[in-house]
Image (cartoon, helix red, strand yellow):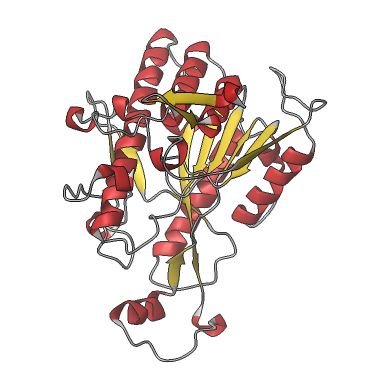
Amino acid sequence: FTRVLDYKKGRPVDSSIHTTMIHHIRRAKHFIYIESQYFMGSSFMWSNSSDRKVKCNNLVPAEITLKICSKIAAGEKFTVYILLPMWPEGVAGSKQVQDILYWQRSTIESMFKKIHAALVHRMQQCNGESIEVSDYLNFYSLGTREAPSTSIRLGIPSSKDERILAITRRHPVYVHSKMMIVDDEVACIGSANINQRSLDGCRDSEIMTTYWHEDYLATDESIPHHDIHGYRLHIWASLAGFMDNSFRNPNDRECVKLMNSIAQRNWEIYLAEESVDMTSHLLPSPFEFMVEAGKEGELRPRRGLYKGRFPDTHGSVLGARWKILPEILTT
């Protein structure tokens, strides 16, 4: 037991969940799939230098970024899929939620910037090679809509929010799971989010189990087709609304493009004036990484969102810092 303990200020701390996740990210050969309620960390690489002192220094975002950059440099295929809620638990425009979104934006933007820089360097070395950040890293969310004819709504809307929802009939599907699948070889499932509170080792109490089979391990050429493979395919078919053979090879460009096209098509349905039943619930993240000529790029609200807000809310997609609340509570 003592082999998994760290020491902070002279006392033993169990940070085995963090250590386990880093271990498997470093061993990854083909792809990583993550579901988490929050996603923040590696504050030492955030773009805003004044934010780097924030004690949100778990290594998961940095290790994912380094893994992708190493694969880009080697000219190898590798893809990371990350599923998050459209916004964290609570009211989208509340100061607490906006604070969390600010930290998430800082984390995700720093990842995209470093990956984009690695891509630019790679393309300068290999003339004619066309590769994009989305070939390697993608964030998603979930949402649903229903047609008036199939609505099961009961009662008369009494509040402003209820009246808006009665018209748009759309709502995010909340992601509360905490899971990481690596190469269909390992599945880490438990209660730990990807934030400092869960991974610090001396803050929130968490638990995680890791599943693998010694006879079904990934090789440099392929991923194993066994229980974890079937488990992931079931998840993806549920999110997409159908099963496609390209899901069997997550690091192939065909799979990446299909997942993104499904998400984009659903996004257009989610934002449309007409409300229809959605049989597929995968959406792109409400933000996107945009690069202008000669610049390093930045995270912006996804095109189509009014004033950069989440649909039907006053909450900013990019969040906003609330300096009154100690960051230890929202990271």
Q: Is residue 95 above or below residue 276?
A: above
Q: Nearer the viewer, residue 15 or 85?
A: 15
User: Residue pushed farthest bottom?
Assistant: 156
Residue at the spot 68% in from the left edge and 17% down from the top edge: 220
Q: Nearer the viewer, residue 159 or 270?
A: 159
Which picture quadrant has residue 241?
Answer: bottom right
Residue 180, image x, y percentages: 58, 38
Residue at the spot 49% in from the left edge and 62% down from the top edge: 173
Position of the N terminus by quadrant = top right
Q: Nearer the viewer, residue 190 or 166?
A: 190
**One can see residue 73 in this view:** yes
Which picture quadrant has residue 94?
Answer: bottom left
Residue 172, image x, y percentages: 45, 62
Q: Is residue 2 above or below residue 153?
A: above
Q: In the shown orientation, is residue 175 left or right of residue 296?
A: right
User: Residue pushed farthest right?
Assistant: 215
**One can see residue 244 in this view:** no
Which picture quadrant has residue 295?
Answer: top left
Q: In the shown orientation, is residue 148 left or right of residue 114?
A: right
User: Residue pushed farthest front?
Assistant: 10
Residue at the spot 73% in from the left edge and 38% down from the top edge: 229
Position of the C terminus by quadrant = top left
Residue 136, image x, y percentages: 49, 29
User: Residue pushed farthest top?
Assistant: 125
Q: In the shown orientation, is residue 207 left or right of residue 148?
A: right
Q: How many marks?
A: 0
